Image (cartoon, rainbow, N blue to C red):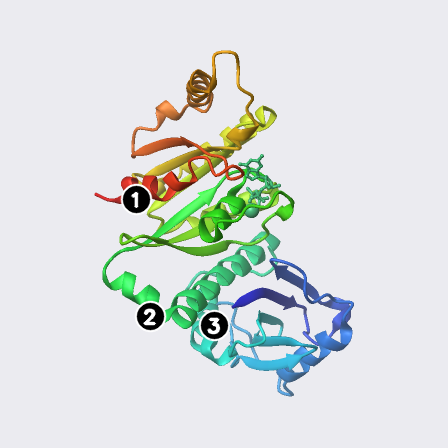
């Protein structure tokens, strides 16, 4: 499984003083690790300089596999000034990824649009999209080939896009659905697009794309949105202070054209933290539900099927209804 992607950029790639390094989802290789960086570059450092670099066409070398410091690396050099590298788990075979790696780099760079590596946002976007595509290829084609193929053929393979601001419980939900477990101390903010595959009884296989919710990642959500069959939005119902922020992020995504008509499941999570009033839980939940729908303007959602569920990943409340609700929404 791919676990990291990085990019070296410099005027002359061997000039470390002038080298920038970008990584996703975390910094495995830093400029301080000169020996490692040098070893990676050395393999790509050819004598002949490219005579004239035509800005409309990038020269892309063959990728090179290396195993350095316990890192299973696969790197490709572009115009002798840029290296894009993949870091795989030790047991993976980088050559399984040769074709997709070359194709993606080509597709991104030589598609007719002039592409500039000077814009850091663009570099980030490239790395994240490539990471997702390669990771997905690994999951769906290499590691899970027969299972996923089976569902594809029967047209019962679905993608759910799960989003919401940080700490609402998205990854906890996916973990609960996948393993049945919950652990309060498990909290680790998600830094990459997590993709988990969940069986839906006989109905098919659901690939859940669990988005990182922290501010810095929200502008990248749209990268993960394509081809979703259902979107799941999660709220922390106990954290009123962040309702406004959460509402804005919700509508930013929902107003996106590519999402028209895709059904939506809204999860009001952490319901265990809501204390019962004297009227009892039922009335309490009903009131809260009405308040949330009003505050978030959910009534304005008219171009798709949607549903709202309270959940507690912690106490397991309604968790068994999540997959059936998704199935109800996506089945015709
Ligand atoms: N009380 C309570 N705590 C919960 C519930 N679900 C999740 N938590 C806790 O909330 C915290 C955040 O959970 P995560 O699943 O990491 O949240 P996330 O939405 O994936 O966060 P990001 O990855 O940062 O976007 C953790 O400490 C969880 O244990 C719940 O239903 N009730
Ligand atoms: Mg998470």
First in sequence: mark 1 vs mark 3: 3
Estimate the spatial distance between the alpha carbons at disc 2 and disc 1, rounded to whole Å: 23 Å
Q: Quadrant of residue 136?
A: bottom left
Q: Residue at x 27, y 52 (%)?
A: 203
As helix, strand or loop, the secondary structure at mark 1 comes to: helix
Q: Is residue 280 left or right of residue 327?
A: right
Is the residue 211 above or below the residue 14 in the image?
above
As helix, strand or loop, the secondary structure at mark 3 comes to: helix
Q: For the C terminus, give its image quadrant.
A: top left
- For mark 2, what is the residue? 146
Dot 2 surroundings within 10 Å: few (below 14), some, or many (20 or more)?
A: few
Task: Where is residue 40? Give x, y as percent.
Answer: 66, 78
Q: Residue at x 68, y 74 (%)?
A: 12
First in sequence: mark 2 vs mark 3: 3
As helix, strand or loop, the secondary structure at mark 2 comes to: helix
- For mark 1, what is the residue? 327
Estimate the spatial distance between the alpha carbons at disc 2 and disc 3, rounded to whole Å: 22 Å
Q: Residue at x 69, y 67 (%)?
A: 29
Tell me, yes or no, if residue 219 can be seen here.
no
- For mark 3, what is the residue? 101
Estimate the spatial distance between the alpha carbons at disc 1 and disc 3, rounded to whole Å: 34 Å
Front residue of 113/85: it is: 85
Q: Quadrant of residue 7?
A: bottom right
């Amino acid at each position: 499984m791919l676990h990291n992607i990085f990019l070296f950029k410099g005027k002359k790639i061997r000039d470390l003083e002038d080298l920038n390094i970008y990584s996703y989802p975390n910094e495995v290789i830093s400029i301080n690790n000169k020996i490692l960086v040098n070893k990676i570059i050395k393999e790509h450092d050819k004598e002949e300089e490219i005579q004239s670099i035509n800005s409309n066409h990038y020269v892309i070398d063959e990728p090179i596999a290396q195993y350095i410091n316990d890192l299973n690396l696969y790197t490709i050099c572009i115009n002798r000034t840029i290296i894009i590298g993949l870091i795989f788990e030790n047991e993976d075979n980088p050559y399984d990824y040769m074709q997709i790696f070359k194709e993606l780099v080509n597709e991104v760079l030589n598609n007719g649009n002039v592409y500039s590596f000077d814009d850091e946002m663009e570099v980030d976007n490239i790395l994240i999209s490539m990471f997702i595509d390669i990771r997905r290829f690994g999951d769906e084609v290499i590691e899970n080939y027969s299972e996923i193929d089976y569902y594809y053929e029967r047209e019962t393979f679905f993608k759910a896009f799960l989003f919401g601001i940080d700490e609402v419980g998205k990854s906890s939900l996916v973990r609960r659905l996948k393993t049945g477990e919950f652990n309060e101390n498990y909290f680790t903010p998600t830094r990459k697009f997590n993709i988990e595959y969940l069986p839906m009884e006989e109905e098919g296989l659901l690939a859940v794309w669990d988005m990182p919710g922290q501010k810095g990642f929200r502008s990248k959500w749209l990268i993960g949105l394509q081809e979703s069959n259902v979107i799941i939005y999660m709220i922390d119902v106990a954290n009123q202070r962040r309702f406004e922020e959460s509402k804005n992020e919700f509508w930013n995504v929902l107003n996106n054209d590519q999402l028209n008509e895709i059904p939506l499941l809204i999860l009001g999570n952490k319901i265990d933290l809501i204390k019962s009033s004297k009227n009892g839980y039922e009335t309490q939940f009903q009131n809260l539900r009405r308040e949330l729908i009003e505050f978030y303007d959910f009534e304005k959602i008219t171009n798709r099927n949607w549903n709202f569920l309270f959940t507690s990943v912690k106490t397991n409340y309604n968790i068994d209804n999540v997959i059936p609700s998704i199935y109800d929404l996506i089945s015709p």
